[in-house]
Amino acid sequence: MFFILFVMHNPNLLDPLLEAWDAAGVQRATVMLSTGMRRLRLKGGLREDIPLMPSLNDFYEMAQTFSRTVFTTAEDESMIDKILEATQRVVGDLHNHETGILLVLPIVKAYGLEKRESQ
């Protein structure tokens, strides 16, 4: 079993990415807002410019500046290949700038992935 972590630089591509992963056979994934060290340094921190009485639009703009980190598991290497192909179809060649970073790590042990019916 493998852990797949993808940091996507363009948050506007999240829905197409999740649709492509779903079509590739991904049954579940978790999505988090994230940002990198470079963005923090360029922006001077985590949105210190939010006003004392922020509007919903202020928070929406903040969410659009963050990357999306998506992670899931894969049973075998054929699934990794499907996820990689689906990802690059949406964001482009991962060797290009501003597409993202995809990591594949072996899972030694996992707890809670398979749920049983409550008694």
Image (cartoon, grey):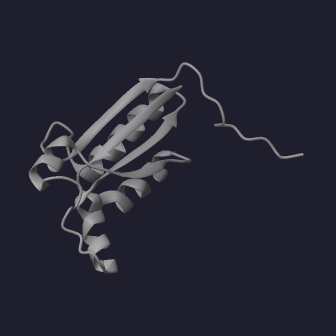
Residue 101 pos. (x, y %): 26, 38
Tell me which residue sits at (38%, 62%) in the image.
15
Tell me which residue sits at (69%, 37%) in the image.
114
Figure quadrant of the C terminus = top right
Tell me which residue sits at (56%, 47%) in the image.
27
Residue 103 pos. (x, y %): 34, 31
Residue 79 pos. (x, y %): 47, 34
**Residue 56 falls in which quadrant of the image?**
bottom left
Foreground pick, 29 / 41 = 41
Query: Number of callouts in the render?
Result: 0
Residue 89 pos. (x, y %): 28, 49
**Residue 77 falls in which quadrant of the image?**
top left
Instruction: Identify the residue at the far top of this view.
Output: 108
Q: Is residue 65 left or right of residue 103?
A: left
Instruction: Identify the residue at the far left of this view.
Output: 42
Vertical relation: 97 (above or below) 66: above
Q: Is residue 104 left or right of residue 49?
A: right
**Residue 110 falls in which quadrant of the image?**
top right
